[in-house]
Image: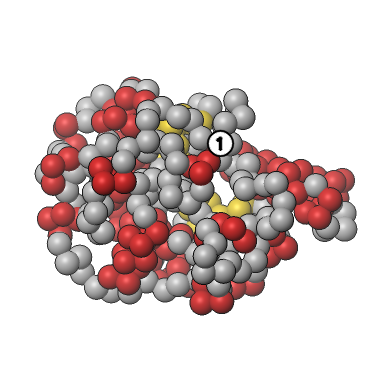
C-alpha cells in the first residue's frame, strides 16, 4: 500500500487543520443541516472518523455494494475504524465477481465485520417465486431484495455511511454531506469527489479494482439490471438500461425525494482538489 503523498493534507479539516475532537462537543445533538454546514470543510476521512467515534459510537454502519467505486470509501473506513460494521445487501442477484471482490476487499483492507443482508425468504416466495420479478416490476424487486432487508439491518444503528457522489447523476447533484434519514443520520463523505479523484485515490493507494470494471462496467449492481457503458455514457447509464429507473430506492427519502436538499449545490471549484485529503 502506498503512503499518502501529503499526510498533512490527508488529515486536514477546515483550512487544512485537523479539528480536535473537543471542537465538536455537541455534534451528536445537532440537526443534519447544522452538521452538514459544520463539516463542510472537513476531509472525508475526518468526517468518517467523527461519525463513527463521536456522532454514533458503536451505532454506526457502512453500507456498501462492493461495486466499481466502493473500494475508496471502504479504504477510508479501514484507516479509521476497520471494525465498523459494513452492510452488504446480498440480493441473490449479484455477479459472482462482486461476491469475490467483497471477499478480496475484506481480506485486503482488514474489514472484520462485513454483514451480508439478505431478503426475507417468505417475501421472495410470495412475490418473486421464479426470480424474474426484476423483469416485471423492478421497483418491487428492489423493494423486497434491497430496501426491506436494509431497513431491517439498520434497525440497530443510529447512523449510516455510504459512498454516493454528486457527480454520479442529476438526482444526486444537490446531495449534502449529512442528511437525516428518519431517525438516523446518513453520512455522504464522498459527496464532493469527482470520478477522476476516485480513480486517482485508487491508484495512489494501489487498491484493487472490481473485476468487471475492465469490461466496461463503471457502476455495478445486480447482474440482470447492469450492463457495460460506452465511453461517452455516464457511469450509471448501464443500470436499469432502457427503463425509467435510476435508483434502487434505498437512497430515496420518505417524502419521495431522491436526496434531501439542505443547501444549494456548491460550485465544483469550491470542493477542493486534493485527492487523499479531499474536502468532502
Ligand atoms: S437491481 Fe434488479 S435484480 Fe437487483 S433488486 Fe433491483 S430490480 Fe431486482
Does residue 280 appear anywhere in the picture? Answer: no
> Count the marks: how many?
1
Looking at mark 1, is its residue's CB closer than 8 Å to ligand 1? no
* Residue 34 spot, x, y in % from top left: 32, 25
Point out the image quarter for the N terminus. bottom left
Front residue of 272 and 158: 272
Q: Residue at x 61, y 38 (%)?
A: 151
* Residue 123 spot, x, y in % from top left: 80, 45
Residue 236: image quadrant is bottom right
Helix, strand or loop status at disc 1: loop
Residue 152: image quadrant is top right
Question: Mark 1 — residue?
Answer: 258
Q: Residue at x 87, y 46 (%)?
A: 126
Q: Please rate how many residues cluster around mark 1, counting C-alpha atoms within 10 Å: few if below 14, some from 14 to 19, many from 20.
A: some
Front residue of 158 and 233: 233
Q: Residue at x 26, y 59 (%)?
A: 275
* 233 lies left or right of 6: right
**In the rendered image, the vertical position of residue 158 relative to residue 90, given as above or below:** above
* 179 lies left or right of 99: left
**In the rendered image, the vertical position of residue 163 relative to residue 50, given as above or below:** below
Front residue of 129 and 223: 223
* 47 lies left or right of 154: left
Front residue of 24 and 259: 259
- Say how the picture is coloured: secondary structure
* 45 lies left or right of 165: left
Q: Residue at x 37, y 49 (%)?
A: 190
Point out the image quarter for the C terminus. top left
Does residue 151 appear anywhere in the picture? Answer: yes
* Residue 40 spot, x, y in % from top left: 27, 36
Amino acid at each position: 500500500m502506498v503512503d499518502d503523498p501529503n499526510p498533512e493534507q490527508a488529515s486536514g479539516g477546515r483550512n487544512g487543520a485537523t479539528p480536535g475532537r473537543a471542537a465538536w462537543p455537541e455534534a451528536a445533538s445537532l440537526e443534519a443541516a447544522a452538521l452538514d454546514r459544520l463539516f463542510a470543510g472537513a476531509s472525508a476521512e475526518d468526517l468518517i472518523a467523527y461519525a463513527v467515534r463521536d456522532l454514533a459510537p458503536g451505532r454506526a454502519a457502512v453500507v456498501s455494494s462492493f461495486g466499481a467505486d466502493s473500494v475508496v470509501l471502504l479504504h477510508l473506513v479501514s484507516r479509521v475504524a476497520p471494525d465498523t460494521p459494513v452492510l452488504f445487501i446480498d440480493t441473490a442477484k449479484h455477479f459472482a465477481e462482486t461476491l469475490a471482490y467483497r471477499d478480496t476487499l475484506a481480506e485486503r483492507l482488514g474489514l472484520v465485520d462485513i454483514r451480508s443482508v439478505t431478503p426475507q425468504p417468505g417475501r421472495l416466495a410470495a412475490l418473486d417465486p421464479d426470480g424474474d420479478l426484476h423483469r416485471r416490476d423492478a421497483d418491487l424487486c428492489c423493494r423486497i431484495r434491497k430496501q426491506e432487508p436494509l431497513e431491517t439491518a439498520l434497525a440497530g444503528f443510529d447512523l449510516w455511511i455510504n459512498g454516493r457522489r454528486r457527480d454520479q447523476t442529476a438526482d444526486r447533484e444537490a446531495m449534502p454531506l449529512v442528511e437525516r434519514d428518519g431517525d438516523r443520520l446518513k453520512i455522504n463523505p464522498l459527496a464532493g469527489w469527482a470520478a477522476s479523484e476516485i480513480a486517482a485515490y485508487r491508484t495512489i493507494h494501489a487498491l484493487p479494482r472490481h473485476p468487471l470494471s475492465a469490461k466496461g462496467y463503471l457502476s455495478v449492481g445486480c447482474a440482470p439490471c447492469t450492463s457495460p457503458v460506452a465511453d461517452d455514457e455516464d457511469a450509471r447509464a448501464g443500470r436499469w438500461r432502457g427503463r425509467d429507473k435510476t435508483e434502487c430506492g434505498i437512497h430515496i427519502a420518505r417524502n419521495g425525494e431522491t436526496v434531501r436538499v439542505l443547501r444549494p449545490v456548491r460550485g465544483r471549484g469550491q470542493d477542493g482538489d486534493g485527492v487523499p485529503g479531499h474536502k468532502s
